[in-house]
Image (spheres, coloured by chain):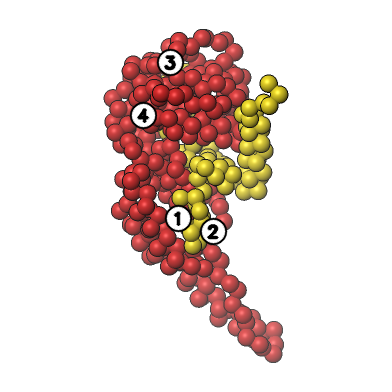
Chain colours: A red, B yellow
Amino acid sequence: MAAQLTQHDDRVLYLYGISELLPAQMPKEIGVALAKIEAVECSGIVCWVSWVPRIDFEQNLARNMENLDWLAEASVAHQRAVSAIAKQTEILPARFGTVFHSETSLRQHVRGRTRNLKRDFERVRGADEWGIKVFGIPPQPALVPKVNSGKDYLKAKAALLPKRREAQNNNADLQKFEDALKRVARETAKVGNISSGQRGLAFQTSLLIKRRDQKKLESVLTKFSKGWENRRRIECTGPWPPYSFVSRTEGEESE
Amino acid sequence: MSAPRGSVVFAGDDVEDDLSLLDILDHVLNKGVILRGNLIISLAGVDLVYVGLDVILTSVETAMRHIVAATLPPERK
């Protein structure tokens, strides 16, 4: 039940996301910082929260974010909590690390955004987020023909190079792939740059896919992966809660 | 959609172990509702690209172990 929350001086309210309805069953998972996941009603909307230690999530948040062990535990817990809630009811996820000093400040900010939130609920209804990554598979090193001298070897090796570059630079197929994905997705979104440094990553996107269109996504992926055998590899993750499809109103861009 | 087909690698909700921290961060730090105000901390511009993949994989394993250990119903109770 959405109950009145108790105020804690050494804790802040961590927001997982917002739902339109309280589900029949509350998620049983443990939230961030091993805190209980609670629901609180604000202006007819359900906010999913936990009371988390002020010292970790307010005072030292920036520093903690750079501590991979801390970040891993907290972000995995965040994802598990949001997923658990998403299994019970549709949720607009909050970004990792959104905290409020008090229930009053949470209520105030939700109240100011009700109209946008309602619109976002319509956008994501009946759909999940899927992550797509395409990696280039490095070509097998071509065998240099038998030669008699070191000079001939280098010449033969150099002759093989342009071919390899050509294969790597041909991205027309990626464009086709992206177009095919756009046809099955309700929306697409640019992915953050967290994993952009991954070796061989050639393309990355997030898709909002209606649940009834999942088969369509699957067939696009299967089709392209067959065509790309030994050249490119597709990684698909999901279903995710619709993290990337919550709009930001003006002035809310990250700083 | 969890079984591998052809060269598509599927990972998802039900096969959490296959999700890397990179994937999780890509999604949870990307967007999401940001309710701004002077009382709110929102995280942005955190550049994690420099982080080595090995480190990230190790730390997600540790994180999973901690969380799973904490959420398992204690048998002794």
Q: Nearer the viewer, residue A182 or B8?
A: B8
List the residue tagged with mark 4. Answer: A251
Q: Residue at x 42, y 21 (%)?
A: A47
Q: Distance between the residues labelled 3 and 1?
A: 42 Å
Residue A81 is left or right of residue A70, and the answer is left
Chain ID of residue with mark 4: A
How packed mark 2 is, by other alpha carbons closer than 10 Å (few <14, some 14-19, many 20 or more), is: some
- Which amino acid type corresponds to the residue marked 2 in the rendered image? Gly
- Using the rendered image, report if marks 1 and 2 lie on a common chain: yes
List the residue tagged with mark 2. Answer: A200
Q: How far apart are marks 3 and 4 (CA)?
A: 31 Å
- Give the quarter of the image for residue A140: bottom right
Q: Which residue is drawn at 52% across and 72% down?
A: A164
- Using the rendered image, report if marks 3 and 4 lie on a common chain: yes
- Give the quarter of the image for residue A114: top left
Question: Mark 3 or mark 4, which has the lower sequence index?
Answer: 3
- Using the rendered image, report if marks 2 and 3 lie on a common chain: yes
Quadrant for the N terminus of chain A, please.
top left
Q: Nearer the viewer, residue B15 or B55?
A: B15
Chain ID of residue with mark 2: A
How packed mark 4 is, by other alpha carbons closer than 10 Å (few <14, some 14-19, many 20 or more), is: few
- Using the rendered image, report if marks 3 and 1 lie on a common chain: yes
Chain ID of residue with mark 3: A
Question: Mark 2 or mark 4, which has the lower sequence index?
Answer: 2
State the image coordinates of residue B49 (x, y, percent, origin top left): 56, 45
Q: In this view, does A191 lie above or below A95?
A: below
List the residue tagged with mark 3. Answer: A2
- Which amino acid type corresponds to the residue marked 1 in the rendered image? Phe
> Nearer the observer, disc 3 or disc 1?
3
Q: Residue at x 47, y 40 (%)?
A: B27
State the image coordinates of residue A41 (x, y, percent, origin top left): 39, 16
List the residue tagged with mark 1. Answer: A203
